[in-house]
Image (spheres, rainbow, N blue to C red):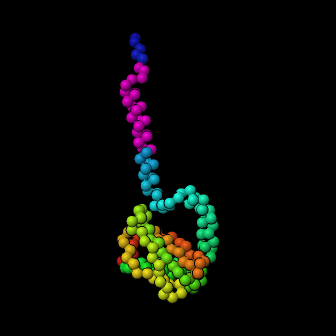
Amino acid sequence: MSIRAQGFTGRHMLLTTVAFFGVIITVNVTMAWLASSTWSGLVVNDTYLASQEFNKNAAAMKAMTASGIAGSLSIKGREIHYDIRDRNGSPTAVDAVTANFKRPVGDHEDFIVALKKLSEGHFLADHDVATGDWIVEIVAKRGETLVMHQAVRIDTAETDQ
């Protein structure tokens, strides 16, 4: 009777190498997919400064939310409408509203528009808005006091253009 000792062969080395690189490639593809599918598109010039201001900005946003003031943005053709109301549904006294339109990725189409006051709490601007996704940052002020600061993500392909 003869007993053959198998040992580590070339086939074992091939399977080990394929398994090793298979795991590496799978992890890299998974991480790349997760990174690209969950990216918000937010770009800041100075990430360190933005991180330092985060808690202050979060507290200010909580206070603004607690005030009950809410804004509503709508786009119809070239008309950009913005209504701002208090918690009772009454128009809020605001002097100036600006809307900063930003594409989620890239800044070559970004623009800022100042809306004209039609009546208390009702504002309008006339500006072309290209079809697609936009992040609109709206700032409403009474004098120098910030009344509302909100960001709205819209898809103009879904609005009445």
Is residue 50 part of the magenta span, yes or no? no
Whether residue 75 appears in this view of the structure is: yes
Residue projecting furthest to the bottom = 119
Residue at 63% from the left image edge and 67% from the top image edge:
59
Residue at 36% from the left image edge and 71% from the top image edge:
131
Above or below residue 126? Residue 150 is above
Question: Magenta residues: mostly which secondary structure?
Answer: helix
Whether residue 89 appears in this view of the structure is: no
Residue at 46% from the left image edge and 57% from the top image edge:
38
Q: Quadrant of the C terminus?
A: bottom left
Q: Provide the residue span drawn in magenta.
A: 6-27
Camera-nearest residue between 26 and 153: 153
Camera-nearest residue between 114 and 158: 114
Instruction: Indicate left or right for 123 with 57 as reference.
Output: left
Above or below residue 25? Residue 143 is below
Q: Quadrant of the N terminus?
A: top left
Picture coordinates of residue 148, whole percent (x, y): 56, 75
Picture coordinates of residue 22, whole percent (x, y): 40, 39
Picture coordinates of residue 21, whole percent (x, y): 41, 37
**Which quadrant would residue 27 be assigned to in this image?**
top left
**Which quadrant would residue 13 be assigned to in this image?**
top left
**Which quadrant would residue 140 be assigned to in this image?**
bottom right
